[in-house]
Amino acid sequence: MNGPRTGRRVATIVGLVTVLAVVIVLLPGRRGWFDVGVYHGAVGHWVRGGDLYGWTTHNGYGFTYPPFAAVSMAPMAALAWYPTIVAHLLLTALAVAFLLRLLVDPLARRHGWTRWYALALTCCLLAGLNPVRDTVGFGQVNLLLVALVYGDLWLLERGSRLAGVGTGLAAAVKLTPAVFIGYLLVTGRWRAAGTAVGAAIGATALAGVLAPDASRTFFTDTLWDTDRVGRLENVANQSLLGLVARLDPAHPDRLLWLVLAVAVLAVWAVRVRRAVRLGDERAGFALTGVAACLLSPVTWVHHLVWLVPGLVVLVASTLPWPPVDRAARWRLGGAVVAYVVLCSGLVWVFSDGWAGPAGSVGANAYLWVSVGMLVFLPVGRAAGADHPGLTEHCGGVVPPRGVAVDRQR
């Protein structure tokens, strides 16, 4: 019995991988490892005594991350170009393996799915997402940072004193993950928040010792130079500020952006506090990743890998399948729509113009997915007394230590 079934599953995975490979090859917009090329060039130039933030590509792009990122990337200076790509791919694969083990494997075990098949299918679905394709194609560090931060989720669920280290290191590499320090503070995780702040300060101080000139340049100049990262109105920028900039590219309304950002912060704070009160750490982390994408002044498409855990939480809230109630069916439909949109590359259709209602919707399509997830991502127990809380459902071990847990809605 198992032989034919295993054969069909292997054939399914091989077929999916083949289709994905063909689609990725045929789709326009292959990225040519551009960002890892920037890392390799700038860090190599710095290690050889040059100016980290003075090095640029032929078309003017340079290193934009804090100096600790360069320190952590220093080993690539000893590698040639192709070995650098291979090393990046291996590290990204390890990050994906960790995230699948943390977020998806517990679902497979709880529901009696064949684990290798569930993980392989999820990996194929992951590869279809535009943010994931861009992260790999550009040679970006996003999935590595997601893995670092979600290492803290694993530690928090086990009450470890080391919780916060990954978030602090990720924030020292790239500023966006610092929102997760805000999450720890808003939800009253003082020890983990202190650990994260200490790790971020320690890493930044280490970079200050090893790269004093680069540190001075970054904090006095590069950090404030928004033109260095690209045009805010570019459709690739799926943040709130990107939305506002597309309304008036010449004069983006910063007051409107501030109002929208405060509204997002308010919704996020209320929802993550409720998530932790209900013992649903995974929804809290997922909501924070969504908020980070909305609040960051620049959220390129590849940054949206922070939405992936939210998709997992959304799908987990509909299990077991078929969904037993109308709310679960609506959530499953929402997850399918969000996934299809994030796979579609729709925003690129409007790269040359976004006038009219269709442009407002299409050019900001990924942003609308983020907004929907911020507002509607389920937290705590799903409807139905026999349905486990989502932290349990997604494999959480125990409620976070030091947090009062309310098991009722």
Image: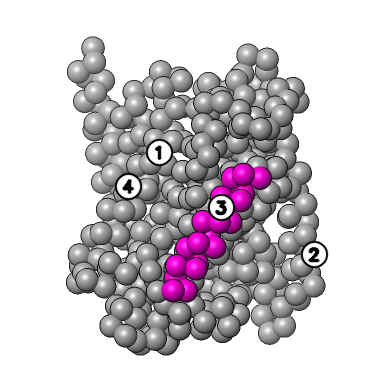
Write the residue at 61% across / 51% down.
194
Three-letter code for the amino acid on which mark 4 is drawn = Leu
Q: Position of residue 48 (x, y in %)?
A: 28, 83
Q: Is residue 196 magenta?
A: yes
The secondary structure type at the circle numbered 2 is helix
Does the residue at mark 2 contact the one at mark 1 (Cβ under 8 Å)? no
Q: Position of residue 161 (x, y in %)?
A: 53, 39
Q: Which residues are magenta?
A: 190-209
The secondary structure type at the circle numbered 4 is helix
Q: Is label 3 or label 2 in front?
A: 3
Dot 2 or dot 1, earlier in sequence:
1
Three-letter code for the amino acid on which mark 2 is drawn = Val
User: How busy is the neighbourhood of tag 4: few (under 14 within 10 Å), some, or many (20 plus)?
Assistant: some
- Judge left or right: residue 219 versus residue 40: right
User: How busy is the neighbourhood of tag 1: few (under 14 within 10 Å), some, or many (20 plus)?
Assistant: many
Write the residue at 42% across / 53% down.
143
Majority secondary structure of the magenta segment? helix
Residue 94, numbered label = 4
User: How busy is the neighbourhood of tag 2: few (under 14 within 10 Å), some, or many (20 plus)?
Assistant: few
Does the residue at mark 3 contact the one at mark 4 (Cβ under 8 Å)? no
Dot 3 or dot 1, earlier in sequence:
1
Dot 3 or dot 2, earlier in sequence:
3
Write the residue at 46% across / 20% down.
110
Residue picked out by circle 2 = 259
Q: Using the rendered image of the protein, determine whether residue 153 is visible from the camera's viewpoint.
A: no
User: How busy is the neighbourhood of tag 3: few (under 14 within 10 Å), some, or many (20 plus)?
Assistant: many
As measured in the structure, the alpha-carbon distance from the residue carrying label 3 to the one carrying label 2 is 28 Å
Residue 100, numbered label = 1
